[in-house]
Image (tube, rainbow, N blue to C red):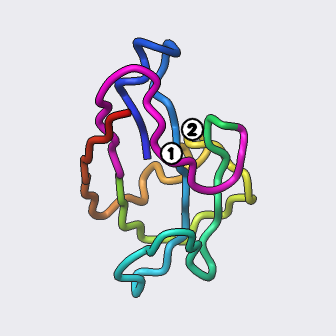
Amino acid sequence: MDDPDAQAAVGKVWVHWVLSNIEPTIAEIPESFTPSGATDGKNDFGELGYGGPAPPDKRHTYIFKLYALDTKLELQKGATKAQVESAMEGHVIEQTILKGTFAP
């Protein structure tokens, strides 16, 4: 989950969540749940897992990107978004984007 509106405040797109290797049978991800077999990456809070929205200034748009891959990624827990994107290269067969907003 990315926050592109954070660029004005922190100078970059803020990464709130990196999660890879979600089983294709998972239909939803409820609050505070990491699916079995999935790998948590490091967010820009310096933590593993989900870091919820906390815009410091105004309404922000949050972008969730979901990719279907033709392989399981060989990544360690704590991989960065850049490492996940690099590992996905050449393996994306479908993708979708969900956008939501949150305001302080």
Question: Residue 55: x percent and y percent?
Answer: 43, 30
Residue drawn at 27 percent across, 63 percent down: 94
Q: Is residue 13 above or below residue 92?
A: above
Question: Which residue is nearer to you in this view: 85 or 38?
Answer: 38
- In which quadrant will I find the C terminus? top left
Is mark 2 in CB contact (under 8 Å) with mark 1? yes
Residue 76: assigned label: none
Return the residue at label 2.
Answer: 82
Instruction: Report the residue at 56% width, 42% height from top.
Output: 81
Q: Which residue is mark 1?
A: 85
Q: Which residue lies most toward the bottom here? A: 25
Binning the other alpha carbons within 10 Å of mark 2 as few (below 14), some (14 to 19) or many (20 upward) gives few
x%, y% of residue 1?
Answer: 43, 47
Q: Nearer the viewer, residue 12 or 76?
A: 12
In the rendered image, the vertical position of residue 20 relative to residue 104, given as above or below: below
Q: Which residues are magenta?
A: 46-64
Inspect the magenta stretch and tell me whether residue 42 lies in it: no
Three-letter code for the amino acid on which mark 2 is drawn: Ala
Name the residue rendered at 40%, 87% in the picture. 25
Distance from disc 2 to disc 1, alpha carbons, whole Å, reads 5 Å
Taking 82 as reference, is 46 left or right? right
| Neighbours of disc 1 within 10 Å: few (<14), some (14-19), many (20+) | few
SS type, badge 1:
helix
Residue 5 position, x and y percent, is: 35, 24
Left or right of residue 100: residue 16: right
